[in-house]
Amino acid sequence: MPFIIFGFLEFLFKGGIFVGRLFNFFVSFLITCIIGLPINKTRINSFLALCGLISFPYYLWLSGHLYTDIIASFFVLIGFVFYIRCQHIFSGISFVLAIASRQYMLVFPVAITAYEVFNYLKIKFINNQKKQSKQQLIRILAPLIASFSIFGWFLLFKGIAPQAAITERSTPEVQLNWWSVELNNSLYFLACLGLYFVIPELILFRPKLRIKNLLTRQNIFLAAVLLFLFIIFPPLEAHGILIKVAKLLPNDFLRLTLFYFLALITCWRFFARPNLAFWILLVNSGLMIKAYPWDKYVLPLLIVFWYLKSIGILDKNIIHQRKISQFL
């Protein structure tokens, strides 16, 4: 879809690549406004969250280039804005447009579906609530139907991508067939999130941390599992700023130690409770086994996390209401 937009702009203005770049910059400006404008009591959170987003080098870089990531990320953000406001039909439409822009945006409606189904089952079986409301059904069906839109593109392309794109030499080997997966790509993705979100969040928001609270059985178990995965699937091949910085280190052991530390603080930050942020990260990490490890693929997730942080609900369970004035 972004190419249709760029083509339409070229048809109207005959401005070449400049018009497309200007449109991307305008869309990124809208993203900046949604996250950074003061919102009632969360104005300081909004400003700090915006600083965190701008600290990600690829955000400003992609805003001034003719890439499809900014447009796709914008539709994802709008999808979450509508979702928080309990406007699930519009949210689903936004996610359909996001998937039409970049296929890997599929992870966001899938994550919302998983989160809503998990909450529904928890309420039904743990709290013994048998009555199912129409609103609960819409919250599950809207993102689920949006997720199914990916199959329309599979039918159109007769595969996961157009044949011409798959035959390109630059196509990652992991994407050449359905069953090929690389877990090391997910580990690198976790490390990127540690660098570009967890550390900036610690610096900007300065949460109170106690070592005693970190050294729990759950965190020690996560550290052990993650260490095992890093030994079996070392993420030593990637593209982006993090891997370039890591290559300044003298050997692979130090590089893996750096990646492990960044991935570990990400797991400790988000895997403590099964809230919406947990499901978003889990599904994103799962998809990365089919993607090439590149720092810029963290951008949509960062935009969503900084938005949720700006309105103060990143670490909370979403409570749906008809009118949520603090998010307007």
Image (spheres, rainbow, N blue to C red):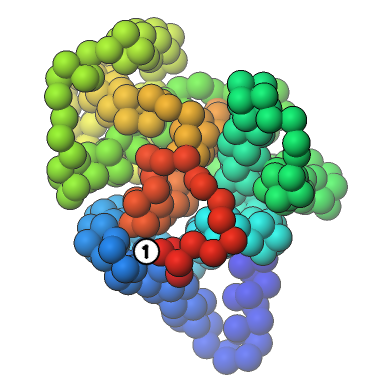
Which residue is painted at 24% across and 44% down in the image? 201
In this rendering, position of residue 22 left or right of residue 220 = right
Secondary structure beneath disc 1?
helix
Quarter that holds the C terminus: bottom left
Does residue 85 appear anywhere in the picture? yes
Camera-nearest residue between 175 and 147: 147
In this rendering, position of residue 298 left or right of residue 72 = left
Quarter that holds the N terminus: bottom right
Vertical position of residue 171 compared to residue 15: above or below: above
Does residue 21 appear anywhere in the picture? no
Q: Amino acid at mark 1?
A: Ile
Vertical position of residue 263 compared to residue 96: above or below: above
Could you say where residue 55 lies in the image, as x and y percent from the top left?
Answer: 24, 55
Q: Which residue is mark 1?
A: 35
Vertical position of residue 33 compared to residue 273: above or below: below
Could you say where residue 91 lies in the image, as x and y percent from the top left?
Answer: 63, 59
Q: Quadrant of residue 10?
A: bottom right
Camera-nearest residue between 165 and 186: 186
Which residue is painted at 35% across and 13% down in the image? 218
Classed neighbour count for the residue bearing mark 1: other residues with Cα under 10 Å, few (<14), some (14–19), many (≥20):
many
Could you say where residue 193 lies in the image, as x and y percent from the top left?
Answer: 35, 38
Could you say where residue 76 lies in the image, as x and y percent from the top left?
Answer: 55, 57
